[in-house]
Image (cartoon, helix red, strand yellow):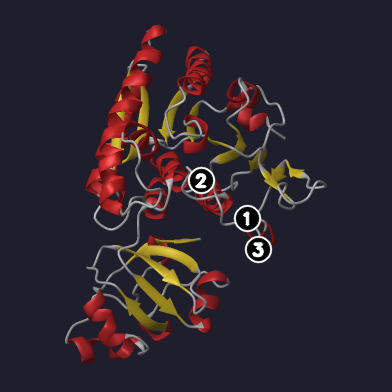
Amino acid sequence: MRDNVKAAKRIVVKVGSSILTDEDGSISKERILYIAEDIVHLVRDGKEVTLVSSGAVASGRGKIKNLPEDEPIPSKQALSAIGQGVLMSIYNDIFSIYNIPVAQILLAPEDISHRKKYLNAKNTFEHLFSWGVVPIVNENDTVAVTEIKFGDNDTLSALVSSLIDADLLILLSDVDGLYDKNPAEFEDANLITYVDEITEEIEALAGDRGTERAVGGMKTKIKAAKIATLAGIDMVIASGFKRGNLVRILQGEEIGTLFAAKEDRLHARQRWIISSMGKGRLIVDDGAKHALLKNGKSLLPSGIIEVVGRFDSGDIVDIVDKEGKVIAKGIVYYSSYEIEKIKGMHTSLIKEVLGYKYYNEIVDRNNMVIM
């Protein structure tokens, strides 16, 4: 069942804040050391490893004492600026012991959503791998203008996995994996070792809470699993507190929860689409939802109920049902301004309303990924 995990060559490892920091918020050099040792082992075994590292804000907080726990976003951004330097210094010192160079890569949503930047980022990773470098990734928190995160580093790691066409994503956390009920509340909770499809029942098992020093919880990990598996990437959630877990996972041991990749791996353009942050939202009616999900159709203006956000022709948007669930992502042929004018209308009226018609479709099926 885990033969694909054993055979994985390109691997993304995400380490959560709760693993990298002690109770007082300071960085745990001991845990970084044994995670680095595992990565060194994998690199020497011929694997290409990217590390997505949380802990910048937490380690920055460890340097600035007596701060309130609930800082506003500007304070978190300042703490991240301090913490990034702390983290990279430690990583560089530890990996230098083993003569393995590391590189810091800070990403912002537009670096993935913009096609040219996406390809440039991909090329940077390819060069680093060819030189035997371990890329260490985090969000460019210090200049984020809307929020401190992509969504969270679980999601970021899934997007990076898709970007670099990884074979395996491993989320090291303070939990052993996905349980059938909350293990903190129920002694008879059982670890789910294998998930072949992320159903509504699986999503319902995810809680909202993370640890005090971490952003997010199991819900963000399920979200990451949906992105990764859709892109054809296996994902494992496992404990980061147990020394040697990374190596044991790659040896095929049944550790944590394995989310199996979809058999039909997306092609490069589709992986870019699911990796990108939607510039806006198109809310569709039940008829359009059925046409997209069941009949494999393109999105026409007649099925659109509402347009949310501002975007241009060629941008990527989320296609959302009436309950607010993202059912697809795709590249729009028309701007938000144009779609606002023709939503709910038959395609025959597009030219009459706009004075021109590029296409009948708002989002063509070939430029869409069903989520």
Front-lying residue, 32 or 232: 32
For marks 2 and 1, the one nearer the N-term is: 1
Quadrant of residue 247 in the image? top right
Marker disc for residue 84: none
Relative side of 170 to 123, left or right: right
- On the question of residue 123 being in view, the answer is no
Q: CA distance from mark 2 to mark 3?
A: 27 Å
Marker disc for residue 206: 1
Q: Which residue is mark 3?
A: 200
Residue sitting at x 50%, y 67%? 327
Q: Are marks 3 and 1 in contact (CB under 8 Å)?
A: no
Residue sitting at x 67%, y 36%? 256
Q: Amino acid at mark 2?
A: Glu
Q: Residue furthest left?
A: 355
Q: CA distance from mark 2 to mark 1?
A: 17 Å
Q: Residue furthest right?
A: 188
Split into 4 quadrants, where in the image is the N terminus?
A: top right
For marks 3 and 1, the one nearer the N-term is: 3
Q: Are marks 2 and 3 in contact (CB under 8 Å)?
A: no
Q: Amino acid at mark 3?
A: Glu
Front-lying residue, 241 or 346: 241
Marker disc for residue 212: 2
Quadrant of residue 316 in the image? bottom left
Relative side of 221 to 135, left or right: right
Q: Position of residue 285 (x, y in %)?
A: 48, 83
Helix, strand or loop at label 1? It is: loop
For marks 2 and 3, the one nearer the N-term is: 3
Helix, strand or loop at label 2? It is: loop
**Vertical placement of residue 94 versus 125, above or below:** above
Relative side of 111 to 203, left or right: left
